[in-house]
Image: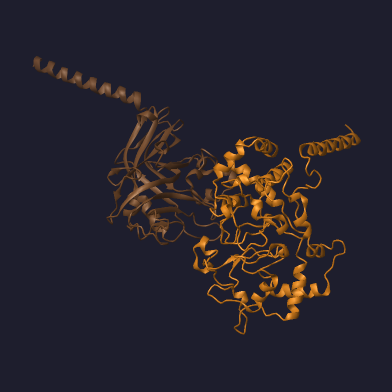
Amino acid sequence: MKRTDTKIGWKSVLLMATVLMAAACSKKDTPGPDAGKTGAFSIEFDNIVSEETFGFHPREYTNAKGEKFSIKLLQYFISNIKLYKADGSEYTVPQEDSYFLVNGGDRSTRFTKVMAPEGDYTKVSFIVGVDAERSKMPVEQRKGVLSFNPDEGHEGGGMYWGWNSGYIFFKFEGYCGLISDDQQGDPTGNKQFKYHIGGFGGYSAPTINNVKTVTVDLTQAGTAQVREGLRSNVHLFVDIMQVFNGPHTFSIPEHPNVMFSEYSVNIANNFPSMFTHDHTENFVRSEDEL
Amino acid sequence: MNFKMKKLLVLAILVGLVFACKKGNDVLPDIFAGFTRPANFPGPEYDFSRNPVTEAGFELGKRLFYEPRLSRNNTIACGSCHIQSASFTHHGHDVSHGIDDRLGTRNPMPIVNMAWQGEFFWDGGVFDLDLSPVNAITSPVEMDETVPNVIRKLREHPDYPVLFKKAFGTEEITDARMFMALSQFMLMAVSADSKYDKVMRNEDGASFTEAEQKGYMFFKEHCATCHSEPLFTDRSYRNNGIGPNRVNDIGRDSVTLNPQDRYKFKVPSLRNWQYTAPYMHDGRFLTLNRVLEHYRNGMVDSETLDPVFRQPDGTIGIPMTDEEKEHLTAFLQTLNDREFVTNPLFAEPEINGGMLVN
């Protein structure tokens, strides 16, 4: 009896110690959310190509139609970020702070870092592109990546149509050897494809609307726990292959140039399928950890 | 302080201001009067509360308008293809030659009475005057430059930080301030001193001759639906039956992607037509006579032809006798505003004793 008692006692002590330690740890790292405080929150747009890492020409990939291609340029706007809690409440990031330009050639642009009230968020949403409201605003209300200013603006990447006022939401260019050298393909003989997708619905006359809102559920791969002084980072994979292989699968040589046209709607419809949630990094102290 | 003293003080301040202006700008101190709406014009479309026109802003806008650094190789300015003596279009060119003498596909539109326009260019693709320079700067056949590069060039230039400070209170050159200054210059390009305007405003005892009056009556009945007074455009997009050109420019359809807009183009103002030849979106007609002949019996039918041209007897066009045509021509002559095209306020400024563009 005594021996058994002692044995149980040791076990209990161990168990209790473990529980205490765990509690201490969780107390230190995950205090309960206080909606009066704010913490950093980011979505990471980590470009991939199918099951491979993202890389530029001459690296080659093969799409669902068996067509080999390489990538020359990739840029897209992300805007209007919203966070949702399990109870259905939502937080909309102030719109003017919510415009980002992700450049495939510059890894430092992959985070959309904002501030949000403390909380455990189970869902995020964002727009691929620039909303119609902002697209119509006067020049002084187009700041940061929406401006034309050197070093901060969008036009180094040519993300604007000067002839048809509006942002190019998604710009993807590359090479495919199957592209013809005539007017239907690339008359320069460089075998280039160009996808410049935009269109916010028109100013005075309605036209194509390629503004796509993407919603990502976080409950499977990790909710975002936003806490003061720390950062929560929702790490998404952005599969560029889905441009070709999405719900609307298409052939590169058949549609090597898609800009402001009816066909662009098909490509924009592929956008939501590009985004998958891989994991979430919570309680991050520095971007170096990401 | 009594009333008299107050009056004196106000007077002293005003005199001081005038001197300050003279000191700040010794080019044309006396003729800048700010933006005013002509008495026979409606309220402007442009929101001046965002961007009030000031003399310093206007002068900066003018300098930028005539600044070839807006183009890739610093050779083409806005003023290269928008020439004041041609009512700010490119007289004698069906389409303009831009950078490296590359040709465009459309006739440059005159920059006149922009304050009353809400959409710009032949297809209305640009919906904000402030954003219209982006089209010219980035077009590969016009200036072939990027806006950030232009801003870099201006920031490195010895004159511009000072000019921006005068206009906007800060030396920091941004896209918005550059666009707003250019708009200030364009907004001031108000043409409202033709004989027609003077008749309408009962100014200087002006009146139409008998031929002009008859022409005016014909105009009101047959032309004013689209070329409505006093701007002489209803700012709509219409297919006037000139038929597709060789490059098959589809016009407004390229912006709306609506087949109903195929071959529709902005109704241009008729003001200053004498200075703006050639005519139509591709500059295919060299004379007013040819334009009138087109409406009389040169029209090409198509699905989107404006219904206004369909006559009850099934013909298309505007029936017009030779006499009516003469009267109409006489009336149209009253729409030319010589004061506007010769107004020194808009002339290219002399910089260090030389011209930049012309």
The image quarter containing residue A14 is top left
| Residue B320 vertical position relative to residue A70 in the rendered view, above or below | below
**Side (left or right) of B6 relative to B140:** right
The chain drawn orange is chain what? Answer: B
Could you tell me residue A119's position as x and y percent?
A: 40, 34
- Could you tell me if residue B258 is visible in this image? yes
| Residue B77 vertical position relative to residue B231 in the rendered view, above or below | above
**Side (left or right) of A245 relative to A76:** left
Could you tell me residue B256's position as x and y percent?
A: 51, 62
Is A165 in front, or is A201?
A165
The image quarter containing residue A143 is top right
Q: Say which residue appears at 60% left-offset and 76% top-offset.
A: B299
Q: Say which residue appears at 34% left-offset and 33% top-offset.
A: A281
- Could you tell me if residue B271 is visible in this image? no
Is A185 in front, or is A79?
A185
Could you tell me residue A227's position as x and y percent?
A: 40, 30
Q: Quadrant of the N terminus of chain B?
A: top right
